[in-house]
Amino acid sequence: MKNYQRTLRACYLGFITQAIAANFAPLLFLRFHADYGIPLGRIALISTTFYFTQLVVDVFCARFVDAIGYRRSVVASEVVSALGLIGLAFVPDLCPNPFAGIIVCAILYAVGSGLIEVLVSPIVEACPFDHKEAVMSLLHSFYCWGSVGVILLSSLFFTAFGIGSWRILACLWALIPLYNIYNFATCPIERLTEDGEGMTIGQLLRTPLFWLAILLMVCAGASEMGMAQWASAYAEAALGFPKAVGDLAGPCLFAAAMGVSRVIYGRFGARIDLTRYMIGSGLLCLCCYLLASLARNPVLGLIGCVLCGFSVGIMWPGTISVISPRLPRGGTALFALLAMAGDLGGAIAPSLVGAVSQRAGDNLQAGMLAGGVFPLVLIVSLVLLTNSAVKEHGD
């Protein structure tokens, strides 16, 4: 008898690997600046490269993963993630241009992160679990706990051994994807659709429900990252907290609240209507953006920031769970394009918040007010879905 709990554990570690890839290098940005003399403007390109690479991988997966196979692809995700993290410890020092070495490593672990993002959800969706919406929510919570763990454990490591030991820590973090290579190589993996039965990208593009799904994912990614990417700066600049407090009170508490939200739905989801729960979360998210943008009391502003993490927790996995049963032949292409839409929203929202803040005289609260448009559009889209305003199945 196949043990799908092994598959689930491998997928949990997959999301932790993605959290390491997304959160470890940003902790070292100032160190890169000091060690290698890289201007801060160029260092910002490391994150841009990471997320752009993920978008490219999302598109690639929509076309080719079915042909390559889930197991080969997801094992490759762990291999390149580990290579990127280990390379970060050595390649910059071996390259004549350290910045180029960092970018090469960032591309490697971004490829791994992108593959994980696309593949883990359909792998779990294809397993014969009861109450898959709850299972999916709990699965996605491991990205949140991974993010909190990377920030806290890395901070403790640097406190104990010094920031100069960051190369050792990069190799230690790489042990997780190295171990998970074995897990994915040996656990049972099923396919969502049989060969030739999944919808093509062209068929998806001609399906109205698919476009509503894309809109939901853009808004889910935007609602999350619009606050998360600016949480530390917001806590420091807008609310007046010291930087050390801002780092912990901003992104760390945000990620923890998001994880709690996903665990709660994972525990009680079988009793809750998912679409209504998402609408309620969207309303809470909108209120959080308004609180963060309009509050004059720093404590209230921080509460808005943290509660926003709780409110967005269900949006990404919830959209996948709401849409996939309505497009049962969507296959890998559907999951890949949904991931691409979420990443696109995650790229758009922080830029919008930053641009509006700059035009308002570096007023981050004005930027947060503009960011409230994304949960608002998400609420409207969910109401349309609830009222069956679009056709649910493709031809």
Image (cartoon, rainbow, N blue to C red):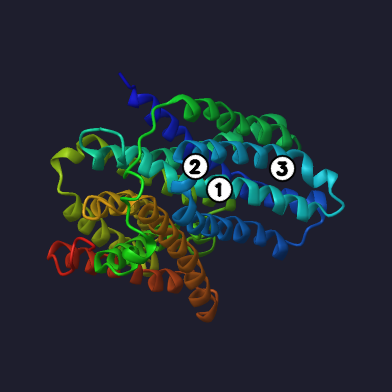
Q: Which mark is residue 88?
A: 3
User: Is there a contact, CB below 8 Å, between mark 2 and mark 1?
Assistant: yes
Residue 212 in the image: x percent, y percent? 28, 66
Amino acid marked by disc 3: Leu
Q: Quadrant of the C terminus?
A: bottom left
- Within the image, what quadrant is residue 188 found in? top left
SS for callout 3: helix
Compute the Cα span from label 2 to label 3. 19 Å
Is 168 left, or right, of 243 in this rendering?
Answer: right
SS for callout 2: helix
Sequence-wise, which precedes: disc 2 or disc 3?
A: 3
Tell me if residue 244 can be seen.
no
SS for callout 1: helix
User: Is there a contact, CB below 8 Å, between mark 1 and mark 3?
Assistant: no
Residue at the location (32% across, 61% down)?
288
Which residue in the protein does label 2 denote? 147
Residue 312 in the image: x percent, y percent? 34, 54
Residue 53 in the image: x percent, y percent? 58, 57
Q: Nearer the viewer, mark 2 or mark 1?
A: 1
- Name the outermost residue toward the front: 196
Which residue in the protein does label 1 denote? 22
